[in-house]
Amino acid sequence: MNFRKGKGREDPEINLIPFIDVLLVIVIFLMVTTSYSKFTALQITLPTADADKAMVQPLEINVAVNPQGQYAVNNVRVSSKDAASLALDLKNAAQAGGESGQGKGNPGDPVVIINADAMATHQTVINVLEAARLAGFDKITFAAQTSGHK
């Protein structure tokens, strides 16, 4: 029994006003939370050193690492393959450098300079870091070569 003959049914409609309100809130949220690339790439100016050269030069221990995993301490090739034996070589180099008067600073506090080849494995460099820790040397730096152009 259909009592509404002649009167058609209205099709349901989607109310667009709340939908537009939600979309505007989402757009505003995305605009506020977006990080722009100018904030990720920091423009910095590195400081320059205008100080006089240090009068006290610390003892330097140069450790070279080649791509085959061989080490040289102060330009003398050593047969060490693990961190413990390399630590002994570093201690011997510190004692030899302190006795020869190479480092006019504290001979017990040398600077270990790591000269690693670009193709050297990470493990060989980590072995040098571990050897310096075992030897008690906490001043470590890496040597790098400049490319000449930017």
Image: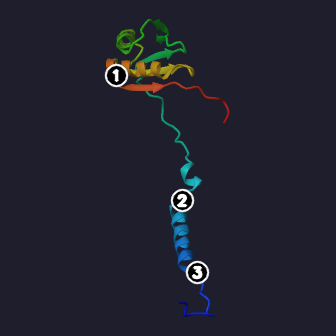
Determine the residue positioned at 57% across, 78% down. 14
Q: Nearer the viewer, mark 1 or mark 3?
A: 3
Element at badge 2? loop
List x then y, in percent, for residue 148. Answer: 66, 30
* Residue 82 falls in image quadrant: top left
Label 3 residue SS: loop
Foreground mark, 3 or 2, reads 3
Callout 3, which amino acid? Glu
Residue 108 in view of the camera? no
Which residue is most to the front? 1
On screen, residue 140 versus residue 14, left or right, reads left
Q: CA distance from mark 3 to mark 2?
A: 35 Å
Provide the secondary structure element on which disc 1 rests.
helix
- Looking at numbered disc 2 in the image, what kind of residue is underneath it? Thr
Question: Is the residue marked by circle 3 packed among few (<14), some (14-19), or many (20+) residues within 10 Å?
Answer: few
For mark 3, what is the residue? 13
The residue sitting at 51% across, 37% down in the picture is: 50
The residue that disc 1 covers is 133
Q: Does label 3 or label 2 sit earlier along the sequence?
A: 3
Q: What is the three-letter code of the residue carrying label 1?
A: Arg
